[in-house]
Image (cartoon, rainbow, N blue to C red):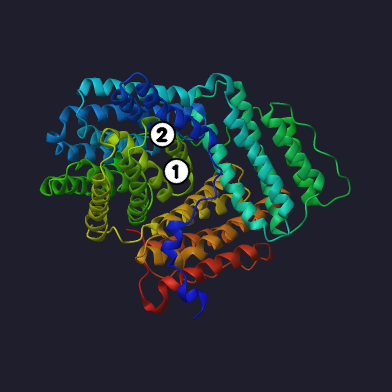
Amino acid sequence: MSSDDVAAPHWLRGLLSQQPAPIPWKRGLRAAASIAGPVAVGLAFGRIDLGVLVSLGALCVVFADIDGPYPYRFHRTGWAAVAGVSGYLAGAYLGSSGAWFLILIAGVSALVSAIGSNASMAGLQLLVFAVLGTGQTADPWLAARCFGLGAAVALLLSLAAWPVRGAAHERAAVAAVYDQIAVMLAASGTAAARQARRDLTDTLNAAYDALFTVRSHLAGRDRSYRRLFVLLTETTPVIEAAVAMVNAKRQAPPEYVTYLLDAAYRIRVREPLAEPPELAGDSRAVAQLHAGLRAVAEFRRSDGDTDRRQDSERIDVGVLLGRRTWMVVLRLMLCVGLAVAVGRLLDLEHAYWVTLTVAIVLKPDFGSVFGRAVLRGIGTAIGVLLGAGVLAISPPSWVLVGLMALAAAALPVGQVRNYGMFSVFVTPLVLVQLDIAQAGEWSLVAARLLDTVIGCAIVLIAGYLLWPGARRPRVGEDLAATLDTIAEYLHHALTGQADEKSTLRRQAYRALSDLRTAFQQSLVEPTAAGRVAAAWWPVIIGLERLTDAVTEVAVAVDRGAEPIGEHDTRVLAAAIREAAKAVRGQRSPKRPTLPDDDRLERVVGELTSVNATLRGPALAGGRRAPGAE
């Protein structure tokens, strides 16, 4: 029997894999201070109950805290704090007798989540802490004030360095783009070049996200941010020339790699950029790269707003009133209602834990419901054994505070690495916070395990197995939309149209990056969704190669080559849009007659490969491929 025969299924490997993200040490220290600190103070003054309430308030900010621009972090954590305090106050006021009102709060939470990412985090905090509030016995107003104090302290710690660090994160994000261009050029002609190209796309996305998020608040008035915009958007010709060299497997002069690394350092320390080195007698490709680097150094453009995408969240009425949003709302309300009902029927002592599990697992935009339920179940089971086991031993209170600090410091690691790891850390932390008064009771272990299993079972059965469309793949529409975006980019780039070409190129590569993320989330599904994602995974590779081929031709046009004829461009764009229609229509793409032009040989070859892949595993044997809903 081969190793492939005994290998774990693709969805299980996907669930257990970790994201290769750096450890967020600073966030870990802030989390430990804001969560364990109040408990330590309460213990010192003999009011550990109040310290726990303050610590719970800090938890809602710690969950929302991320690395990024300070204005964005303030917006995200601030709304999370407001939602958490509001939810906790409502839950504490309603008490266990008002648990049925959690169904309405769940509906509001899901509806708010449709607005955008920050609203989604706020919606989650609203529901989670409303559930926690129903399980508390303290005076509602006293509990809410302590909770609000904890949220305020955590928010202050998160933003404390804002006055002195300013745009440090944004400078680092822009500098990382220059570093990654250097890495890609250094890898040209090697097997690592393709991965370096993808890493550059991710780095560009992060830099644009950072700057446009801040820009939406500053309205372009800050000079330092304008400078960073110029430094970022001026990389467009550099990247295009670098991609062309990588596609041609040509080695870039090491002097330019060194120059890019030096430019990244100068951006980080806020120093002016040096002039790029002059290399006489080299190829036209190197000359194009030099021209791009010189434009960066000279700041030839006064304003870097070549891409006017805004990431500020606006309410899209069409999304809020759409069928998909309301299906999400109804699913969450149903599962929360079932959790409340089961808790009442089984007369569980802490029934809110079942509802809490449902609320966290069934978050609509945090990836696969199946994957989160499995990871939550496994992670919580381990966490319960750790947390409840520690409580059952009944160690000294100061030992519990130290363990809380360790678990809190590990939360950001779990958030960026693996959701199951996050559950392992957060479960003992919340257990100690909520049940510290019950230290010494071994019954907590079985009770918390049972509550978690019931919550995950409700989600898997009612919210996944029996819910209409839950097991159907949803990646088809994302794939079709990406094809349409690439078609639009191709039409502008190959005909030499300068207007919006840079914007469309960025949109195309961003769409590819988002598509890769959506497919990776679907890969953890054990049903048709995971199989289709696995079968269509080569399409993403093909689309990346196709987009690079289009960029290569566009660079040649920018260097003075004749633009591609309007007829050939229309044929290619129509062929890509036909592929998008085929995905939406759950059929094989038609076989168009593609242009016979030597300059388009690579574009035609990659497009033919994409079409062949779309006709492949997902459509083999006359079966209809699962497409978008």
Is residue 347 rendered to the left or right of residue 222?
A: left
Find residue 415 and name its label.
1
Quarter of the image for residue 65 reads: top left
Numbered disc total: 2
Determine the residue positioned at 51% across, 75% down: 3
In the current view of this chain or complex, which residue is farthest to the bottom? 1
Quarter of the image for residue 397 reads: top left
Could you tell me if residue 326 is visible in this image? no
- In terms of secondary structure, where does tag 1 sit? helix
Camera-side mark, 2 or 1: 2
Is residue 99 rendered to the left or right of residue 207?
A: left
Give whichever of 133, 110 is nearer the camera: 133
Quarter of the image for residue 51 reads: top left
Determine the residue positioned at 63% across, 52% down: 197
Q: Amino acid at mark 1?
A: Gln
- In terms of secondary structure, where does tag 2 sit? helix
Give whichever of 473, 172 is nearer the camera: 172
Please state the horizontal and vertical placement of residue 389, each as a whole percent of the image. 33, 45
Q: Amino acid at mark 2?
A: Val
Is residue 214 rendered to the left or right of residue 552?
A: left
Please state the horizontal and vertical placement of residue 400, each as a whole percent of the image. 38, 34
* Contact (Cβ within 8 Å) of mark 2 with mark 1: no
**Quarter occupied by the C terminus:** bottom left
Give whichever of 351, 445 is nearer the camera: 445
Q: Is residue 411 above or below residue 565?
A: above
Find residue 442 and name its label.
none
Find residue 399 and name its label.
2
Give whichever of 587, 593 is nearer the camera: 587
